[in-house]
Image: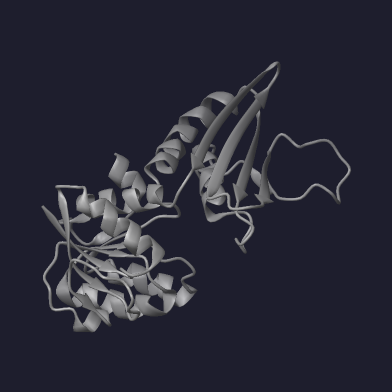
Amino acid sequence: MTKIIMHGCNGKMGRVITDICKEDPEVEIVAGVDPFDGVAQDYPVFKSIDACDVSADCIIDFAAAAAVDGLLAYAVEKKIPVVLCTTGLSEEQIAKMKESAADVAILKSANMSLGINTIMKLLKDAANVFAPAGFDIEIVEKHHNQKVDAPSGTALALADSINEARDGAYEYVYDRSQVRKKRDKKELGISAVRGGNIVGEHEVIFAGLDEVIEIKHTAYSKSVFAKGAVEAAKFLAGKPAGMYDMADVIG
């Protein structure tokens, strides 16, 4: 049984993870941390991570960037591994995260979905087959109309998986409207669509002569990210200090 502290337990993702853990006999949330009231939980909830005196095997973090510094200090002091899911970290916080990984296990990933991370693994093999054969590669990502960044971090992570497999051969192209020329073979196009309440859709297109291969992932709810975080917590519990990501979880 993996005992978990849910950092940001009263937020949307914290509540989804709480519900998932109730149905998973391999995990138990033993404490939560959240400065906001209004959500009844089946475990003790502390206003700050410093106040938490409950022992655990791992911390899942889906809180605010402002709370990450305190979380990292706590994790290092208590030697509790952290699945760090909060986004929007500053360069200083990223540096602090890497520094903290010398003392405690930390898992950070651009996307917590098991499906996306499996696709990232598959893309490396696909790129090594299709790129030498002259296939063009494009990525199209779709998200809700409230998302402020484009392209998504996940789209860039997918592109990076392909580029890593091809020794950095590709140049990312986000906009062709100002250039009138044929597509270069070393372009990797990334397009963003924003509309409605699309949770997240990513499609990688390998376009060759008379055939097209499409690898697509659609998230219908945020629970796919929550499930990945829980699986990551199971994996990270008991691991030695160091930086990990979801690629380590799926093996």
Give how far across and how far down residue 44 sits, in percent.
17, 73
Q: Is residue 225 visible?
A: yes
Residues 210 and 194: in front is: 194
Residue 136 is left or right of residue 14, and the answer is right
Residues 81 and 22: in front is: 22
Residue at image position (31%, 76%) is 34
| Quadrant containing the C terminus in the rendered view | top left
Q: Is residue 64 above or below residue 121?
A: below
Residue at image position (58%, 28%) is 214
Residues 132 and 130: in front is: 130
Q: Is residue 237 above or below residue 43?
A: above
Residue 10 is left or right of residue 79, and the answer is right
Give how far across and how far down residue 136 sits, in percent.
67, 31
Q: Is residue 112 visible?
A: no
Residue 117 figure quarter: top left
Residue 137 is left or right of residue 73, and the answer is right
Residue at image position (23%, 68%) is 41
Give how far across and how far down residue 9 sits, in percent.
30, 68
Give how far across and how far down residue 189 sits, in percent.
68, 42
Q: Is residue 212 above or below residue 62?
A: above
Residues 72 and 28: in front is: 28
Q: Is residue 227 above or below residue 187?
A: below
Outermost residue toward the right? 180
Residue 120 figure quarter: top left
